[in-house]
């Protein structure tokens, strides 16, 4: 496949224009919802229509797929999100009201189920996403109850974040979230980003003036996916814009579903495939 050159306008202090190359395209998904890359460079993708999780190597070669519709172990009913930690793979099995945990080879390990919570007040319903912090705590976005639930390494419930008890800082309609290396949670709630610390304390809210679909934290940047494209902001109190990549810059017509970044490569997930570009974060 020939490289297709595209121009990406990065909005920096000097307004520099960078030319990037499309290096690789792979995947044959029916309705991809999420991707995540582990520290070994392996790529994991949820396909909600086929109820499958697929693992690829760093060159886009398919290694294994697991799943199929159902409620037994390793089966899914709308896998909405995948999160790859250094050890395990966390799959948010939305309509089964659980998070399934696999090893890096997609061997089933365990599940966190809503009905296993000792306190029924904190049972989750239709979870949308799961993330794991650098110290091993994991967080589940409980979409039906508009809150985030925190669990420890052993899967024990710890606390609720952004629920009704949070008062004026209660979440309204959270759909995506991310965590920084400093253990701050960035929650997409309607079209704002609400920031909490790991203990559930409200820190700030940010309105970027965009209609947002997903939030990601990569290295020291806050990356936002909108209908327009991708925007990157410095992850500090100023949230200075670093770049903006429009769909026209990519020369694509498909919807951008998710993104990731590793080794100066930008991975862009559409409903049907992954496109990989040479790209250096500012």
Image (tube, rainbow, N blue to C red):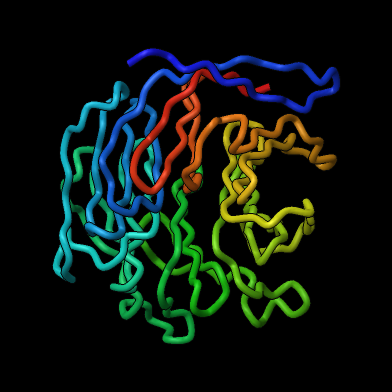
Left or right of 264? Residue 166 is right
Left or right of 39? Residue 229 is right
> On screen, 7 above or below 38?
above
- Residue 203 seen in the figure: yes
- Percent of width and height locating residue 244: 70, 34
Residue at the image position 64 percent from the left and 55 percent from the top? 212
- Percent of width and height locating residue 268: 46, 36
- Percent of width and height locating residue 34: 40, 49
- Percent of width and height locating residue 264: 51, 18
> On screen, 35 above or below 120?
above
Quarter where residue 174 is shown: bottom right
Residue at the image position 85 percent from the left and 22 percent from the top? 13
Residue at the image position 56 percent from the left and 20 percent from the top? 6
- Residue 135 seen in the figure: no
> On screen, 185 above or below 222?
below
Q: Of 1 and 60, which appears nearest the observer?
A: 1
Residue at the image position 50 percent from the left and 45 percent from the top? 256
Tell how many labels.
0
Left or right of 116? Residue 260 is right
């Amino acid at each position: 496949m020939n490289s297709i050159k595209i121009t990406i306008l990065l909005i920096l202090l000097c307004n520099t224009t960078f030319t990037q190359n499309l290096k690789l395209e792979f995947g044959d998904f029916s309705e991809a919802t999420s991707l995540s890359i582990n520290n070994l460079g392996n790529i994991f993708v949820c396909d909600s229509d086929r109820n499958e999780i697929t693992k690829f190597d760093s060159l886009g070669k398919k290694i294994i797929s697991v799943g199929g519709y159902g409620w037994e172990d390793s089966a899914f009913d709308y896998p909405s999100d995948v999160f790859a930690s250094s050890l395990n793979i966390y799959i948010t099995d939305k309509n089964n009201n659980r998070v399934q945990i696999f090893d890096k080879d997609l061997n089933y390990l365990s599940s966190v189920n809503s009905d296993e919570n000792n306190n029924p007040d904190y049972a989750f319903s239709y979870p949308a996403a799961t993330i794991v912090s650098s110290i091993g705590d994991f967080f589940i976005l409980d979409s039906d109850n508009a809150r985030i639930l925190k669990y420890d390494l052993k899967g024990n419930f710890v606390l609720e974040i952004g629920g009704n008890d949070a008062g004026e800082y209660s979440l309204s309609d959270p759909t995506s979230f991310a965590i920084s290396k400093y253990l701050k949670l960035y929650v997409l709630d309607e079209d704002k980003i609400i920031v909490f610390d790991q203990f559930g304390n409200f820190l700030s809210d940010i309105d970027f003036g965009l209609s947002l679909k997903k939030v990601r934290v990569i290295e020291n940047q806050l990356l936002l996916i909108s209908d327009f494209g991708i925007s990157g902001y410095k992850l500090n109190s100023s949230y200075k814009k670093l770049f903006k990549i429009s769909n026209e810059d990519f020369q694509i017509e498909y919807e951008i579903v998710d993104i990731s970044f590793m080794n100066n490569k930008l991975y862009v997930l559409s409903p049907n495939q992954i496109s990989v570009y040479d790209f250096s974060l500012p």
